[in-house]
Amino acid sequence: MEKQILRDYLEKQAIPVVIRKKKSYLTYEGIPDRYVYILKKGIIKTSVVTHEGREFNLRYLTDFEIVSLFKDESSQEVEAPFNVRVESEEAELYKIVRDQFWADVNRDRLLQDYVKEYYRRNLMDTMKKMQQMLMNGKFGAVCTQINELYETFGVQTTDGVLIDFEVTNEEIARFCGITSASSVNRMMQKLRESGALKSVDRKLLVTDIDFIRENIIY
């Protein structure tokens, strides 16, 4: 019901939809941007760059959702807090001039409530991610990320739950703050040897999610 509020607004205002191809960026961290993007269809990834110049992945977005909305309501342009990149073959996104969007939000109480809930959810997601990174060791962090992929992309099959999206060990390492992909390789091999994970056509098949979750500190 909450997302219907946003859908109704987009339809009423006839907000245009843009299409972006795989590996194209919507925003770059620290670069001024004047648009709000809302994902209509596709997969995108958010990430930041550490002081050492390494990329740290934040999350995948796959559902109808606001992609980039920055708190400053008065400026026409603000610096993007993270990178946003298309990960599917293409993605469809609503593209709104940010000061127009904020003017509309301030006139619509239901839309205001939706935006407040958006910020609340994002704060909780960020806190959860920080907690997982602080409380889990490297192996627990990898298990945490696999569980997140399981919940985001999982498709039930006769042999287990297929993570129906190609994710490399390098990408998993970037989600976990691990500098060496070889470390992730060893941990993934441990999961395969335990019988919790298999590789099928370059995708991951989860055969024992309970074992994976037993290694996560919540």
Image (cartoon, rainbow, N blue to C red):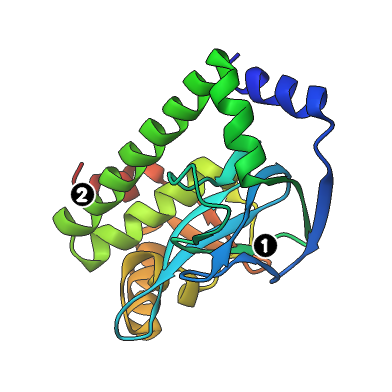
Answer above or below: position of 13 versus 88. Answer: above
Residue in the picture at 37% in, 66% down: 193
Is the C-beta separation of discs 1 and 2 under 8 Å?
Answer: no
Residue 63 in view here: no
Quadrant in the rendering for residue 41:
top right
Quadrant into which the N terminus falls: top right
Figure disc tally: 2
Residue in the picture at 64% in, 57% down: 165
Frontmost residue, 210 versus 80? 80
Tell me the crowding category of disc 1: few under 14, some 14 to 19, or many 20 or more residues within 10 angstroms, Cα based.
many
- Amino acid on which the number 1 mark rests in the picture: Val
Distance CA(mark 1)–CA(mark 2): 27 Å
Tell me the crowding category of disc 2: few under 14, some 14 to 19, or many 20 or more residues within 10 angstroms, Cα based.
few
Which secondary structure lies at badge 1?
strand
- Of all residues, the one furthest to the left in this rendering is 135
Which secondary structure lies at badge 2?
helix
Judge from the rendering whether residue 137 lies leftward or rightward of residue 162; answer left or right. left
Q: Which residue is the site of mark 2?
A: 131
Judge from the rendering whether residue 14 lies leftward or rightward of residue 79; answer left or right. right
- Amino acid on which the number 2 mark rests in the picture: Gln
Q: Where is residue 118 in the image (x, y as percent from the top left)?
A: 46, 32
Q: Which residue is the site of mark 1?
A: 86
Q: Position of residue 157 (x, y in %)?
A: 65, 41
Q: Which of marks 1 and 2 is nearer the N terminus?
A: 1
Judge from the rendering whether residue 19 lies leftward or rightward of residue 204; answer left or right. right
Q: Where is residue 16 in the image (x, y as percent from the top left)?
A: 83, 42
Frontmost residue, 148 versus 59? 59
Q: Position of residue 143 (x, y in %)?
A: 33, 56
